[in-house]
Amino acid sequence: MAPLETHSSLASRLMAESDARAEALIGLVRMFVSATLFFTVAAVLWRLPPQIQELRGHALYVALGVTASYFLLGVFSLLVSRSKNYRPVWGLFFALVEVALVLINIYANIRAPHANALFALASPLILMIALVLVLQVLRYRLLIHITVSLLLLTGTLLLILFGGGTETISDVFIEEVLGLYSLPPNVVRMVMFGVMATIVGVAIWRSRRLMERIAVETEALHNRNRFLPRELTAALDDGELERLREGEERDAVILFVDIRNFTGLSERLGPAQTAALLTSYRALVSRTVTRHGGVVDKFIGDGVMCSFGLKCSLKEAAAQAVDCACAITAEAAKSAHDETSRYLTACAAASGQVLVAAVGDEERLEYTVIGPPVNRAARVEAFAKEHDYGVVITGEIFDLTANQGNPWRKLGAHMLRGEKVATRLYAKGTP
C-alpha cells in the first residue's frame, strides 16, 4: 500500500489508502474476468465448425491474446497497488492499457473476413466496455473516469463507423451471429452482468465505510475540540502542525482568572458541590473568553490562563482582554445561586511578546503560550487575590485601553514577586 506521510491531512491519507485499495480490488476483478473469458473463448474455438473457425478463428485468437494480456495487467496492477511505489498516476496508466486492449479486441472482430461493423457489438466480449466503465466507480478519481470514458466510447464509435469490414452480410456470418446468442455466450453475458453488479455493490460498501470512517474522525475531532484550543485542532486539519510546533513569536495579552479563597470555599461545599461549581465556573470562563476573541490556554484547578491577540493587533487584544475580565467578574457574581455557592473571581492581564507553540512529543501535544508576560500576568493575578481586587491590569494594558473611559483605580508602582522592576498597576471591582 502507498506510504502515508505523517504530516498529510486526514483527507489526503484517506484518499491515498482508497486509491491503493481500489487498484488492488480492480486487479483482482481483472484476473477473475479475464480467466473466465479466456477459458470460454478457448472452449468456443475448440467446438467451432471448420467453416466458422476459418472465418472467425483469427478474431477469437486475438480475443485469447487480449484476455491473457488482461490477466497479466490484473496481476501487475495488484502487485503495484500493494507496493510502496504506488501513486494515483499508476491507476490512470492501467486504465489506459485496459482501454487499448478493449479497442484491439473490437477492431479484430470488425476486420474478420465477411464481418460487418453492424455486428461488432454482438459478441459477449463487448461487455468489457461496460465492465471497464463500471470499474471506475471503485476509484474516487473523476479525472480518470472522464478520460477512460471519453477514450473508450469515442474509440468504439470510430471503429464501428470507420473500422472497415465488408458491406455484404453472408449467410455463414448470420449463422455465427445467431450462435453468439446461444446458451454459452449468454452464460458469459450473465457472468459479466453479475460481476458488474458485484462491483457496484462493493463500491457502495466502500463508500459507506469511507463515510463512516470520516464520521468517526469528525466525532473524534469534535471531542478533541472540547479539550484543545481551536487553533491547535485547525492546525491539525490544515496540515500546519509542523509550523505550529516550531512556534511563532507574537505580541499578545495574557489574562489569568482565579477564584478568590477557593480552598475555604471548597471546604464548605464538599467534593460534589465543588465539582459542580468548577464545571459551572469553567463553562462561564470558556464561553466568555471565546465570545471576546480569546483562547483558553489551560485550566489549572480553579485557575485559568487565557491569551488574546493571536489574530489581531495588540491594542485590540488589550481591549478584548479587559472587556472579558470585567464580563467574567460580573457574570460570576450573577451566576451564583446562593451565598454558599457564590464565588468571586480575580482577573489580571499583562502584555508583551510571547512564543505561541504546540509543545510535547509525538504522543501528546499541548497548545501553549510562553514568555515573560505569562509570568507577569500570574504575579499580577496573585496580587489581585491578595488585595481582593476584581480586575487588575498593568500600566501597558491601561495605556492601550485608556480611551475606553473605564473607571480604573490607580494603584501606583508595585514590586511584584520575583521581579526587579516595579510595575504600574490599575484595579477595579473591589469587593
Image (tube, rainbow, N blue to C red):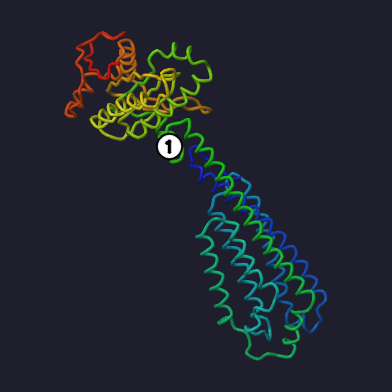
Q: Identify whether 272 is placed above or below 92.
A: above
Q: How many marks?
A: 1
- In the picture, measured across the screen, residue 62 lies left or right of residue 383, that is right
Q: Is residue 2 or residue 69 the one in the foreground?
A: 2
Residue extending farthest front: 338
Q: Quadrant of residue 77?
A: bottom right
Q: Identify whether 335 is placed above or below 39.
A: above
- In the picture, measured across the screen, residue 341 lies left or right of residue 98, that is left
**Residue 428 location, x and y as percent?**
25, 19
Q: Quadrant of residue 335?
A: top left
Residue neighbourhood size for the residue with mark 1, other residues' Cα within 10 Å, grouped as few (<14), some (14–19), many (≥20): some
**Residue 231 location, x and y as percent?**
40, 34
**Residue 42 location, x and y as percent?**
78, 70
Question: Which three-letter amino acid code belongs to the residue tagged 1?
Answer: Ala
Q: Identify whether 115 is placed above or below 289.
A: below
Q: Is residue 56 or residue 145 the one in the foreground?
A: 145
Residue drawn at the location 47% of the way across and 14% of the way down: 266
SS type, badge 1? helix
Q: Which residue is mark 1?
A: 235
Viewport quadrant of the C terminus: top left
Residue drawn at the location 51% of the way across and 27% of the way down: 364
Viewport quadrant of the N terminus: top right
Q: Quadrant of residue 408?
A: top left
**Residue 354 location, x and y as percent?**
32, 24
- In the picture, measured across the screen, residue 231 lies left or right of residue 22, that is left
- In the picture, measured across the screen, residue 90 lies left or right of residue 26, that is left
Q: Is residue 408 or residue 344 the one in the foreground?
A: 344
Residue drawn at the location 63% of the way across and 47% of the way down: 82
Q: Is residue 202 or residue 78 the one in the foreground?
A: 202
